[in-house]
């Protein structure tokens, strides 16, 4: 049984322990383990000396009575060396008004509080960082899924919206449609409505028609896809914007 802090410190140093735990109850006992742990060196930040200092503080704060288990490897949790601690002799006497004894309980509590807060902040930061990384990976997966679906279809399908320049009587043709001239019919002059301007130049119409023809040859469901893209655009589907931006950047 260790009755002085110097005994505990020597036990840890002489055996080159790198991980130690102190509990209220004896290891392996059947007593309630709720809030049983007093010290766990893995919880403390800082170097070896900082961990020793925090161990001493927590043992004193919890009455100086504990059971310890220590290991010479940081990740071991079994077959450790054990000890029993009773630090009553090391506990300072209650302070007498006007007489200093070198031990300030308020400072000790504040120091422990700051250390525990720092450890909590660290763990909370790590948890939030892991959650953020998980959300970012899921977002990227969803975005790539949407882009992968539309990349092969959206660019050529979007260009078919205006291919009506070469549609004559519901029939597609690559050659100009010609007909025998019809003799003019004499009629009284009347005001003709102003013809609507063509929306595209001849070069644009040629390219649109060629793209539509190519898309029809490689995609049997080209009409369903065209309807789907139009519906996505009209409905404001959230996948439409990222897919459109991706395609325009990679054309």
Image (cartoon, rainbow, N blue to C red):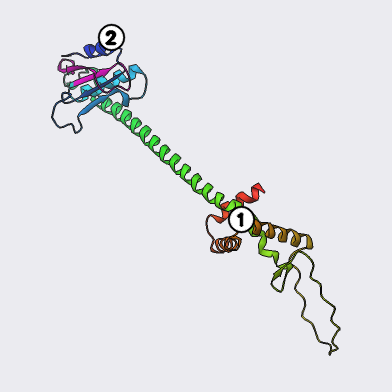
For label 2, the residue is: 14
Foreground mark, 2 or 1, reads 1
Q: Residue at x 68, y 57 (%)?
A: 214
Q: Residue at x 70, y 70 (%)?
A: 171
Q: Upstream in the sequence, badge 2 or badge 1?
A: 2
> Is any atom of residue 86 visible in this view?
no
Outermost residue, left side: 30
Question: Which quadrant would residue 170 be assigned to in this image?
Answer: bottom right
Q: Is residue 205 above or below residue 70?
A: below
Residue closer to the observer: 104 or 140? 140
Q: Residues within 10 Å of mark 1 (few under 14, many from 20)?
A: many
Question: Total label count?
Answer: 2
Left or right position of 46 against 58: right
Q: Residues within 10 Å of mark 2 (few under 14, many from 20)?
A: few
Outermost residue, top side: 14
Labelled disc at residue 1: none
Magenta-span inclusion, residue 74: yes
Q: Is residue 201 above or below residue 170?
A: above
Check whether the beta carbons of the residues at disc 2 and disc 1 lie within 8 A of each other. no
Q: Position of residue 52 (x, y in %)?
A: 29, 18
Q: Secondary structure at mark 1?
A: helix
Q: Position of residue 139 (x, y in %)?
A: 48, 46
Q: Which span is picked out in magenta?
A: 67-91
For label 1, the residue is: 154
The CA distance from mark 2 to mark 1 is 71 Å
Q: Residue at x 38, y 37 (%)?
A: 127
> Is any atom of residue 99 visible in this view?
yes
Q: Position of residue 78 (x, y in %)?
A: 25, 22
């Amino acid at each position: 049984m260790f009755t002085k802090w110097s005994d505990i410190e020597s036990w840890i140093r002489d055996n080159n322990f790198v991980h130690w735990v102190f509990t209220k109850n004896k290891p392996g006992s059947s007593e309630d383990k709720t809030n049983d742990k007093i010290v766990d060196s893995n919880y403390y930040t800082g170097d070896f000396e900082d961990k020793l200092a925090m161990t001493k503080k927590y043992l004193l704060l919890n009455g100086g009575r504990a059971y310890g288990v220590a290991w010479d490897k940081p990740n071991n949790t079994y077959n450790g060396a054990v000890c029993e601690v009773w630090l009553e002799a090391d506990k300072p006497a209650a302070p007498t008004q006007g007489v200093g004894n070198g031990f300030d309980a308020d400072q000790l509590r504040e120091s422990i509080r700051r250390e525990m807060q720092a450890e909590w902040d660290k763990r909370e930061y790590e948890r939030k960082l892991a959650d953020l990384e998980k959300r970012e990976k899921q977002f990227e997966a969803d975005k790539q899924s949407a882009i992968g679906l539309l990349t092969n279809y959206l660019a050529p399908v979007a260009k078919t919206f205006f291919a009506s320049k070469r549609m004559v009587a519901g029939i597609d043709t690559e050659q100009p449609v010609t007909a025998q001239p019809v003799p003019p019919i004499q009629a009284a002059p009347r005001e003709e409505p102003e013809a609507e301007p063509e929306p595209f130049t001849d070069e644009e119409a040629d390219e649109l028609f060629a793209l539509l023809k190519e898309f029809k040859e490689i995609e049997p469901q080209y009409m369903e896809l065209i309807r789907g893209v139009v519906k996505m655009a009209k409905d404001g589907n959230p996948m439409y914007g990222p897919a459109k931006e991706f395609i325009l950047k990679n054309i």
